[in-house]
Image (spheres, helix red, strand yellow):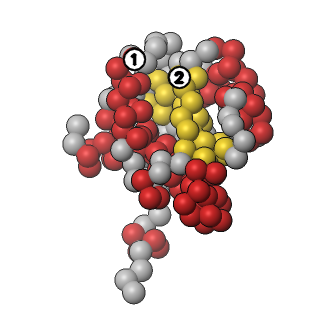
Amino acid sequence: MDFFETVMVRRSVRVFQEKDVDALDVKQIIESSMQAPSAGGLQAYRIYLVRNKETLEALAFAAHGQECVSKAPLAIVFTADQKRSASKYQERGFEFYSVQDATIAAAYSQLAAAALGLGSVWVGGFDPFEVSRLVRAGAYEVPVAIIPIGHPAENPARPQGRSMKALVREV
Ligand SMILES: Cc1cc2nc3c(=O)[nH]c(=O)nc-3n(C[C@H](O)[C@H](O)[C@H](O)COP(=O)(O)O)c2cc1C
């Protein structure tokens, strides 16, 4: 699948088959995330792989009961490593770059999953303290996204989206 096809086919998939994600696919997804740009090349994020059923269920509970988390064979939690970015960029790194680093890495994971024929969804609605506790995140780590990944059991339509006219200004 070429890049533009990957971008166009990626949709939020919230229902998965009861089938594990191949270990090589997991590796390729993580490696893709690690290629994402990051402020100063610091990669100020952490990546937590969750495959344990009980932890997936607890994560889903922390995400206000979203079943796409508990029913996925795998969820990846991306956290922003605020201290790492602050070591070079002080306040801006702490508050902003670390979150951006983690966000871009998470976005790459979704594109990689799509390129592999897998489905994923960005879950941002969760209790951050509970998610941190569940993945045993360190101090000054902020969970940015939970990305459940699996073999799709649905084929969502592309949302309408906003028009280019609404989104783009030539200045
Ligand atoms: C910051 C952010 C938070 C989101 N949180 C959730 C969420 O908690 N649960 C969910 O089902 N989808 C969530 N989504 C997915 C969006 O609903 C989805 O991307 C959007 O509807 C567009 O659909 P598409 O991904 O198929 O293009 C989130 C997406 C983003 C970027």
Give the residue at mark 1.
23
Q: In this view, does 95 lie to the left or right of 97?
A: right
Q: Residue 154, can we see it?
A: no
The amino acid beneath tag 1 is Ala
Neighbourhood count class around disc 2 (C-alpha, 10 Å): few under 14, some 14–19, many 20 upward: many
With respect to residue 171, does 48 lie above or below? above
Q: Which residue lies furthest to the left in this view?
A: 2
Viewer-proximal residue among 91 and 146: 91
Give the image location of residue 168, x and y in percent: 41, 74
Identity of the amino acid at label 2? Leu
From the image, tell me which residue sits under label 2.
Answer: 74
Please report the residue visible at 73 percent of the width from the left and 23 percent of the height from the top.
Answer: 58
**Nearest to the observer: residue 28 or residue 71:** 28
- Does 142 sit above or below residue 165? above
Residue 61 locus on image (x, y percent): 75, 28
Q: Earlier in the sequence, mark 2 or mark 1?
A: 1
Local crowd size for mark 1, using a 10 Å CA cut-off: few (<14), some (14–19), many (≥20) = few
SS label for mark 1 = helix
Q: Image height check: is 54 above or below 93?
A: above
Image coordinates of residue 124 in percent, x first then y, are 64, 44
Image quadrant in which the C terminus is located = bottom left
Q: Residue at x 41, y 40 (%)?
A: 33
